[in-house]
Image (cartoon, coloured by chain):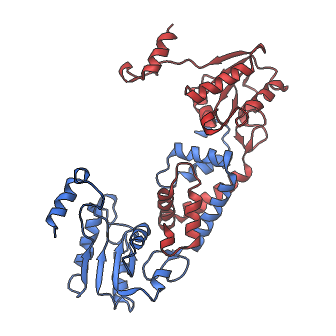
Chain colours: A blue, B red
Amino acid sequence: MADALDASDALNALILALQKLPGVGAKSASRMAYHLLQHDRAAARQLALALSQASERMHHCQWCHTFTEQGICSTCADPQRDRSLLCVVETPADQAAMERTGVYRGLYFVLLGKLSPLSGIGPSDIGIERLLQRLASEHGQAVQELVVATSFTAEGEATAHVIGQLLKGRGLRITRLSRGVPIGSELEFVDLGTIAHAFADRR
Amino acid sequence: MADALDASDALNALILALQKLPGVGAKSASRMAYHLLQHDRAAARQLALALSQASERMHHCQWCHTFTEQGICSTCADPQRDRSLLCVVETPADQAAMERTGVYRGLYFVLLGKLSPLSGIGPSDIGIERLLQRLASEHGQAVQELVVATSFTAEGEATAHVIGQLLKGRGLRITRLSRGVPIGSELEFVDLGTIAHAFADRR
């Protein structure tokens, strides 16, 4: 776009770089660039610094594979955690949601992805192999139950299925979160698949 | 969110910094941060560099006020341009759209904003004063027609009205782009206000 104008390299470079962010197209990128230059150069400089520092400092936790600045993240290093429980989640955001409930005191394993055959993402592209290594390692020996908390989407279910298949016959208890009607929702507005599952799993 | 987890400072700092981008909330910011760290650290470093360089190098053109790395942007400096025509636009993106038509050979003035009383943006917050200075300067003496190409929204119309009022009686021809039915559109799908204007301005 801006090349029709005074095609300043620094501005075009910024617009192109912003388009590498997920969900940001050419129009949003222009809007962001102009906003930062016009109204908030301090934010631009702060974002530049945050990007550099995060790229440099963030590594994967050796145990659970989430992002951390340490070798082992604070959750994995916490001696109060129940080492017999391991909850498998897709993303750090899912892990955060689980943590906020306050009911789970075990450890985590973060896949950082889910199977998606349509996008060419197979078992080797996500953390399933590292999960097997974790369970085989000395830190994994204590695990008795694996709570597979991947999403209830086709991809999340496929991921859970593959994990279940790979770990069959190892004497591990493998569970899923229960499916059902969300608390606070009226049945009328709940999708039919959920109601059918809630009926089948009634108790 | 991430503070329930291994609240790594570099990751949280990045998520907070991304939220300064227009249209980016907490969820999108997390998604962007995780995406960059997981899949594209090169893009993160490139964006950091682009932000630093743009913040440092981009200034306002002394004549038209758009962003440029030079003192005077290449459009204003172009001797082929018709200096009797000055087109007033809200943003560099609007300027680019006008340029792409290929029919305009005059100069521009970029307001970098529009009046928005509801958001507390008055005439002094946008470039109207600089526009008056431009017209009063030696470079502005040649201007005979001011094409006010602000948007056909309430705010763009208000901006055009204020500019018209301020420049009344100076012997300048002040015009607006014509309003009407967009080319290629079926009348059925054009909004009624546009059809009414197109009828009133029929020729």
A181 w.r.t. A173: above or below = above
Q: Which residue lies at the image location 29% right of the left edge and 69% below the top edge?
A: A159
Residue A47 lies in what quarter of the image?
bottom right
Residue drawn at the location 72% of the way across and 25% of the way down: B81
- Residue A101 spot, x, y in % from top left: 39, 71
Q: Is residue B169 above or below residue B34?
A: above
Left or right: A203 with respect to B167? left
- Image coordinates of residue A178 in percent, x first then y, are 25, 69
* Front position in the image: B183 or B169: B169
Residue A77 percent location from the top left of the image: 48, 86
Q: Quadrant of the C terminus of chain A?
A: bottom left
- A185 or A54, which is in the foreground? A185
**Rendered view: B90 above or below A146:** above
The residue sitting at the top extreme is B203
Q: Is residue A92 above or below residue B80?
A: below
Instruction: Please tell me which residue is depicted at 58% across the width and 52% down the height of the picture.
Output: B21
The residue sitting at 55% across, 47% down in the picture is A29
User: What is the total number of numbered labels drawn onto the structure image?
Assistant: 0
Instruction: List the single residue furthest toward the right.
Output: B138
Q: In which quadrant will I find the N terminus of chain A?
A: top right
User: In this orientation, does residue B94 appear?
Assistant: yes
Q: Which residue is more in the foreground, A170 or B98?
A: A170
Find residue B45 and report its horizontal and vertical position in percent: 60, 63
Whether residue B105 can be seen here: no
Instruction: Locate residue A57: give its quadrant.
Output: bottom right
- In the figure, is residue A82 to the left or right of B9? left
